[in-house]
């Protein structure tokens, strides 16, 4: 248990009958009149839904002990993604629903953070950006600006992103894992 005065970004709370909510942002407010309160933005750990919630200052909230571990993606076993704990070398199968959009950027050997609660994986968090090779993209035609200067390109993971016309097949690019945006070329 903690009070609303102890809230921090990233803290996981157990609310509404055991649902887990991660604190995205919080703000302590002390109006001139009336009691102080804490305005928060919470994200449901399972569904990803975001809500705004206000708590009175100083009330007790139940916190969930979420264990965030550095793991390495090993391989895909059927539908499951198998991660290896980098400290204990234990293998952990994680279902595709839990991996979510991170699957678009996972290659064998990539590091990720896996959040665990009571023995089961809650979500997989990748670094903000990853470097991947372009598996295939059409050659850019000089003077073709009808598409705003971008074209589709397939990454080595099979995921498709939009890249500038000058990018060619086989080049390594940096991709934002939160939005899927092209961030730039990687110079080897």
Image (spheres, rainbow, N blue to C red):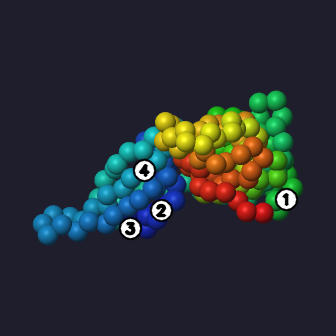
Few, some or many C-alpha atoms within 10 Å of disc 2 (few <14, some 14-19, many ≥20)? Answer: few
Q: Earlier in the sequence, mark 2 or mark 4?
A: 2
Seen at 43% across and 64% down, the residue is 7
* Residue 17 percent coordinates (x, y): 46, 40
| Separation of residues labelled 2 and 1 (CA atoms) | 28 Å
Going by the image, does 33 lie left or right of 146?
Answer: left
Disc 3 to disc 2, how far (Cα)?
A: 12 Å
Q: Is residue 171 left or right of residue 100?
A: right
Which mark identifies residue 5? 3
- Residues marked 3 and 1 touching at CB (< 8 Å): no
Helix, strand or loop status at disc 3:
helix
Q: Which residue is mark 2?
A: 9
Cα–Cα gap, marks 3 and 4: 16 Å
Q: Are marks 3 and 2 in contact (CB under 8 Å)?
A: no
Could you tell which of marks 2 and 1 lies nearer the N-terminus?
A: 2
The local secondary structure at tag 2 comes to: loop
Name the side, left or right, on which 148 lies relative to 80.
left
Q: Is residue 18 something one can see in this rendering?
A: no
- Of 162 and 97, the residue lying toward us: 162
Q: Which mark is residue 88?
A: 1
In the drawing, what numbered circle is on residue 28?
Answer: none
Q: Earlier in the sequence, mark 3 or mark 1?
A: 3
Residue 171 image point, x, y percent: 74, 50
Q: Find disc 4 in the rendering and name its residue.
A: 42
Question: In this orientation, does residue 26 appear?
Answer: yes
Foreground label between 3 and 2: 2
């Amino acid at each position: 248990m903690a009070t609303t005065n102890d809230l921090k970004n990233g803290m996981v709370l157990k609310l509404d009958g055991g649902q887990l909510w991660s604190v995205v942002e919080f703000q302590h407010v002390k109006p001139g009149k009336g009691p102080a309160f804490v305005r928060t933005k919470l994200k449901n750990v399972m569904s990803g839904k975001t809500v705004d919630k206000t708590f009175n200052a100083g009330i007790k909230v139940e916190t969930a002990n979420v264990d965030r571990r550095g793991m390495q993606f090993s391989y895909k076993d059927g539908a499951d993604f198998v991660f290896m704990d980098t400290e204990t070398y234990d293998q952990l199968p994680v279902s595709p629903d839990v991996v979510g959009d991170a699957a678009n950027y996972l290659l064998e050997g990539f590091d990720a953070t896996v959040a665990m609660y009571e023995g089961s994986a809650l979500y997989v968090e990748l670094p903000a950006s990853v470097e991947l090779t372009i598996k295939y993209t059409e050659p850019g035609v000089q003077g073709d600006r009808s598409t705003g200067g971008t074209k589709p390109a397939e990454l080595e993971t099979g995921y498709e992103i939009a890249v500038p016309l000058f990018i060619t097949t086989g080049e390594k690019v940096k991709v934002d894992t939160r939005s899927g945006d092209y961030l730039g070329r990687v110079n080897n």
